[in-house]
Image (cartoon, helix red, strand yellow):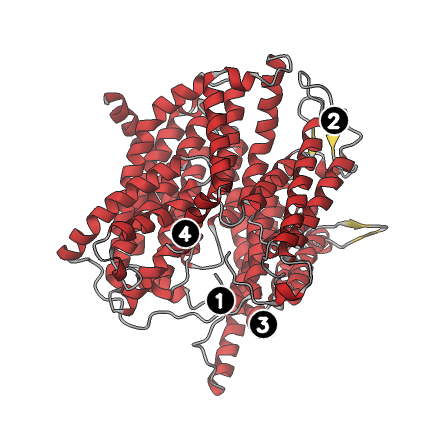
């Protein structure tokens, strides 16, 4: 306990430096901005801003990038409530009751409870990261290559189970991602794999190129398909502070949402996305009068918003302690860390305590800033929503091009984002989700590495994965989860959580 | 993902899920391609895995998923193939390629494109790319291009010092020595901003004469 306090003290002393405070604020501001604007997500933004962080020190860079991520989760709810469009994928459920509240003239209350719930959830999640950091790192230290391999398999299986739509398609996407990761020079033998003699492929496909293509360019193409009209709430936003009765009604939902979101966020394989859906489903199920949901129930905003924010923060846990990114944004964080010469994983905490604890402390500070950025400035964000998409996407296009060019100064990289954009658009059209592919891509190289190493150690005996207790348990969990996801009855309830919630 | 069957899928004879079928065929093609592309790599043994082992089995796995999806396309009623907005796809691709070949000299076959720098590549990407939307308006895009390019020049070139070529190589060679690059950068960004503001003012005064409905926007999720 005293350790924890001392560590947090160190963290705050790092995070409260003027530069880091500024970067944290900048990250939160940019995050809110892209969260509010539909059509720009944190993945593309972080990929775009990666080159900007080259000149910063690693702590500041990661503080800013983290701010963008959780800031976007805050901002997404504003759009969901006021415009009935999720600013981010995770705020889909907030549209249901949030927008109804806005229609009833309670937009301010909805925004207020979303922000307060998020702040509470963020605080709990920050403490959770701090508390779980040390024990999990200790656990990671005893992990060998076989354990890591099994853990990554489990992460990918979770990504399949938690992805929306067809399980088969999600599996295929992961395999394609891992396959794509094997392009380039083989790390052990130095042989070029599937490069076709193209020199720009010999280092493999660059992660930011893939991410920007799949999530920047493909998103633009998909958005150009559909034309809708924005329905910005024209009524007054009204008072922001919920009344005592509102608070009393919402408080249990916030608590439940925080718990659900925190737990799901830790799961490898992007559990954070499921958080809001699960929270909404639970709130609806235990409500005394479920028919209120969808008509402006405050619990339907408070629960999912808390779950959302809690999950987005606890998803840092697998990254910081085990070095395994649970979702695409965390995968970008891996990229940002490696650029600065930090290897994500259990070593971070002992070798770079400043970074580890500074980042955690900055998350709490960031959440406080977001409360300020979001509530009083909400009018500003609403005005931003009036920027039409026909002006927004050319700007995104140019930022993507400049961003990717500045990483390696290679025009071929710029052309590759066009290629991957096209690929991503094709995938969306065929009903595939690009997110599992990106995760497979990130874990692919590591997985092959660990698989080879553990098989070399066991002299080619695959039983090594079943003889060691930890690996056996992890692999059994994976198999059970996969089988369960394919079972019709369970599939149905999983789809229900996503669609009906 | 639960689009109800609208009848069109059933009309297509034995193909009941065109989307699954197409997706499956794509995966099979990719899997076969991967196996072929990795066929010259040594496989090694389990104890000493060669570089070709993972790619081959991944290719086989991808193809197997493809086969399953193709089967599903015949057996299960699924979604039809969604329409593709070709205008957007083609124009956006053009815009990105235009940026890539103009930002710095790129050898294209026997030729080399002239490196024109961000000051040309940026506006080019915005104005060309803008036409991906059927609602594109030339004047608006020019304003956006001028202001954003100026902003990016200051941000990436002046503030962050990233090695992005800002001006055409010809201009840089002609001016080398006579003026500092940073001053040139600031001056031209200033000119772009003034031009942009001028354009905005021009558009505004034009818009006042003919009322434009500002309530409808196009949007996206």
- Sequence-wise, the earlier of marks 1 and 3 is 3
Asked if the residue under mark 4 is in contact with the one under mark 1, i.e. CB atoms within 8 Å, the reply is no
CA separation in Å, label 4 and label 2: 47 Å
Q: How many marks?
A: 4
Residue receiving disc 1 = B219
Quick one: quadrant of the C terminus of chain A? bottom left
Q: Which mark is residue B136?
A: 3
Rendered location of residue A293, percent (x, y): 28, 59
Chain letter behind tag 4: A
- Residue A481, relative to residue B136: is it above or below? above
Report the mark closest to the observer, 4 or 2.
Answer: 4
CA separation in Å, label 1 and label 3: 14 Å
* Residue under the image location 77 percent in, 39 percent down: A198
Residue A236: name its quadrant. bottom left
Chain letter behind tag 1: B
Pick whichever, A204 or A104, lies toward us. Answer: A104
Q: Which mark is residue A496?
A: 4
Badge 4 marks a residue whose secondary structure is helix
CA separation in Å, label 1 and label 4: 27 Å
Report the mark closest to the observer, 1 or 3.
Answer: 1
Residue receiving disc 2 = A191
Badge 2 marks a residue whose secondary structure is loop
């Amino acid at each position: 306990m005293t350790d924890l306090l001392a560590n947090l003290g160190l963290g705050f002393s790092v995070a409260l430096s003027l530069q880091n405070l500024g970067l944290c604020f900048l990250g939160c501001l940019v995050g809110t901005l892209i969260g509010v604007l539909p059509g720009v997500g944190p993945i593309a933004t972080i990929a775009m801003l990666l080159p900007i962080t080259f000149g910063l020190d690693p702590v500041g860079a990661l503080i800013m990038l983290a701010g963008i991520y959780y800031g976007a989760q805050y901002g997404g709810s504003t759009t969901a409530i006021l415009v009935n469009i999720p600013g981010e994928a995770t705020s889909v459920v907030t549209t249901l009751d949030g927008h109804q509240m806005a229609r009833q003239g309670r937009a301010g209350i909805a925004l207020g409870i979303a922000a307060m719930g998020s702040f509470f959830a963020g605080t709990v999640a920050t403490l959770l990261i701090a508390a779980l950091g040390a024990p999990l790192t200790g656990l990671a230290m005893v992990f060998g290559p076989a354990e890591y391999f099994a853990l990554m398999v489990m992460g990918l299986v979770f990504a399949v189970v938690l992805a929306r739509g067809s399980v088969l398609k999600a599996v295929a996407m992961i395999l394609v991602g891992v396959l794509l990761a094997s392009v380039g020079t083989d790390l052990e033998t130095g042989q070029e794999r599937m490069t076709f003699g193209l020199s720009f492929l010999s280092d493999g496909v660059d992660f930011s190129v893939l991410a920007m293509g799949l999530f920047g360019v493909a998103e633009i193409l998909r958005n150009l398909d559909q034309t809708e009209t924005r329905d910005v709430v024209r009524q007054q936003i009204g008072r922001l502070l919920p009344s005592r009765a509102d608070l009393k009604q919402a408080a249990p939902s916030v608590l439940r949402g925080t718990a659900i979101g925190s737990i799901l966020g830790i799961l490898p394989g992007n559990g954070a996305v499921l958080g809001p859906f699960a929270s909404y489903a639970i709130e609806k199920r235990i409500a005394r009068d479920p028919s209120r949901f969808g008509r402006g129930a405050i619990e339907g905003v408070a629960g999912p918003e808390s779950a959302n924010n809690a999950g987005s923060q606890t998803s840092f846990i697998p990254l910081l302690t085990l070095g395994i990114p649970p979702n695409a944004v965390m995968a970008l964080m891996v990229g940002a860390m490696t650029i600065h010469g930090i290897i994500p994983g259990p070593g971070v905490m002992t070798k770079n305590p400043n970074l580890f604890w500074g980042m955690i402390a900055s998350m709490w500070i960031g959440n406080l800033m977001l409360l300020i950025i979001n509530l009083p400035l909400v009018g500003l964000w609403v005005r931003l929503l009036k920027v039409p998409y026909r002006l927004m996407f050319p700007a995104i296009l140019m930022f993507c091009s400049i961003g990717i060019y500045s990483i390696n100064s290679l025009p071929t990289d710029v052309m590759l984002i066009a290629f991957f954009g096209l690929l991503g658009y094709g995938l969306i059209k065929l009903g595939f989700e690009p997110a599992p592919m990106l995760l497979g891509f990130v874990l692919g190289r590591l997985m092959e590495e660990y698989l080879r190493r553990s098989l070399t150690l066991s002299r080619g005996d695959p039983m090594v994965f079943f003889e060691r207790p930890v690996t056996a348990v992890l692999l059994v969990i994976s198999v059970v989860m996969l089988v369960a996801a394919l079972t019709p009855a369970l599939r149905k309830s999983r789809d229900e959580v996503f669609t009906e919630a | 993902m639960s689009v109800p069957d609208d009848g069109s899928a059933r009309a297509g004879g034995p193909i009941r899920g065109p989307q699954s079928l197409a997706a499956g065929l794509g995966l099979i093609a990719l899997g076969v391609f991967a196996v072929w592309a990795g066929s010259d790599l040594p496989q090694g043994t389990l104890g000493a895995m060669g570089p070709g082992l993972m790619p081959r089995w991944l290719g086989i796995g991808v193809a197997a998923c493809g086969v399953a999806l193709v089967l599903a396309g015949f057996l299960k009623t699924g979604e039809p193939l969604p329409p593709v907005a070709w205008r957007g796809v083609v124009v956006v691709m053009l815009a990105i390629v235009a940026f890539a070949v103009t930002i710095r000299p790129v050898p294209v076959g026997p030729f080399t494109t002239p490196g024109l720098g961000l000051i040309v590549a940026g506006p080019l990407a915005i104005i060309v790319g803008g036409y991906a939307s059927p609602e594109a308006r030339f004047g608006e895009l020019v304003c956006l291009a001028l202001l954003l390019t100026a902003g990016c020049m200051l941000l990436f070139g002046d503030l962050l010092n990233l090695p992005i070529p800002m001006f055409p190589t010809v201009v840089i060679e002609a001016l080398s020595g006579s003026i500092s690059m940073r001053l040139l950068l600031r001056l031209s960004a200033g000119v772009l901003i003034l031009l942009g503001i001028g354009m905005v003012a021009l558009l505004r005064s034009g818009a006042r004469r003919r009322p434009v409905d500002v309530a409808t926007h196009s949007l996206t999720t």
